[in-house]
Amino acid sequence: MGFGFFDPLYFIFIGPCLLLSMWASFKVKSSFKKWAGYRNSGGLTGAQVARMLLDREGLHNVKVEHVRGSLADHYDPTSKTLRLSDDTYASNSIAAAGVAAHEAGHAVQHKVKYPLLGFRSAIVPLAGFGSNLSWILIMIGSGMMIFMQGGLGYYVTWAGVILFSAVVLFQLVTVPVELDASNRAKKVLPEIGMDSPQEQKAVSQVLNAAAWTYVAAAATSIATLLYFLVRLGLFSSDD
Ligand SMILES: [Zn+2]
């Protein structure tokens, strides 16, 4: 019985997921970089696109702010603020419009009380401390099992695994939430004039690549959970 980074079984489980993550993050950066070089047909900055889409939905109270960093764009439901980063806020590229529209999609989800968004927000705290504490419990528990022959160590390990399940759940719920925000973006951009075939293709490329990063993250956490369960002997009869 042993857990952790030096266990070859762990790499067998998460290896394909890590490759998928690397591929997805490469696609996000390369497609964004490519379409950041093309001006959108409205000549609107990301900030203007976001403001326009929010106002169309009556979301005049949602602020649009600039945040430092690259691809750090997000919608913050607690302060009702849409934050666009360096490459998006003041850029009038197709890529910037796509990202801004996606973030506005999250604000719309918030407004219409899209159920999975509410559920995701509700498990954020648990998933937040679970992502670190679960590993600590699992490491301590498996160490206890080696030196103390089962018993308490087993329960500590299981507590860690159950806590880690909250992280898995969070990553899983994130996928449909992100896809929905992207679908809203793809639907609404042609309505504000960004309807050339090239623009639609570009927006799809950027947003689909971003979706794959969430799929990869979910796959990685599921594979990690399965690895824990296999190591705990859940799938073997004679361990
Ligand atoms: Zn998003």
Image (tube, rainbow, N blue to C red):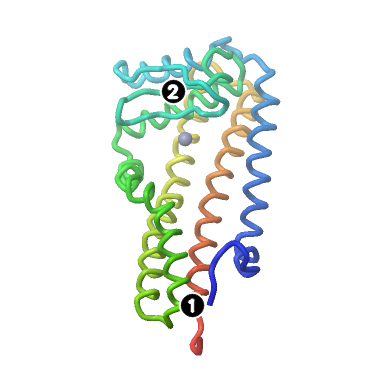
Give the left or right position of residue 91, taking residue 76 as reference. Answer: right
Q: Which residue is mark 1?
A: 146
Q: Of marks 1 and 2, which one's residue comes earlier in the chain?
A: 2
Q: Callout 2: few (<14), some (14-19), or many (20+) C-alpha neighbours within 10 Å?
A: many
Residue 218 point in image, percent of width and height: 51, 52
The amino acid sitting under disc 2 is: Arg
The amino acid sitting under disc 1 is: Ile
**Which of the pair 125/17 is nearer the observer?**
125
Q: Residue at x 53, y 77 (%)?
A: 1
Mark pair 1, 2: CA separation? 48 Å
Give the left or right position of residue 159, taking residue 6 as reference. Answer: left
Q: Which residue is mark 2?
A: 83
Q: Residue at x 55, y 19 (%)?
A: 86
Residue that protrudes farthest toward the front in the picture: 147
**Which of the pair 168/161 is nearer the observer?**
161
**Which of the pair 226/204 is nearer the observer?**
226
Q: Residue at x 40, y 23 (%)?
A: 82
Q: Residue at x 49, y 88 (%)?
A: 237
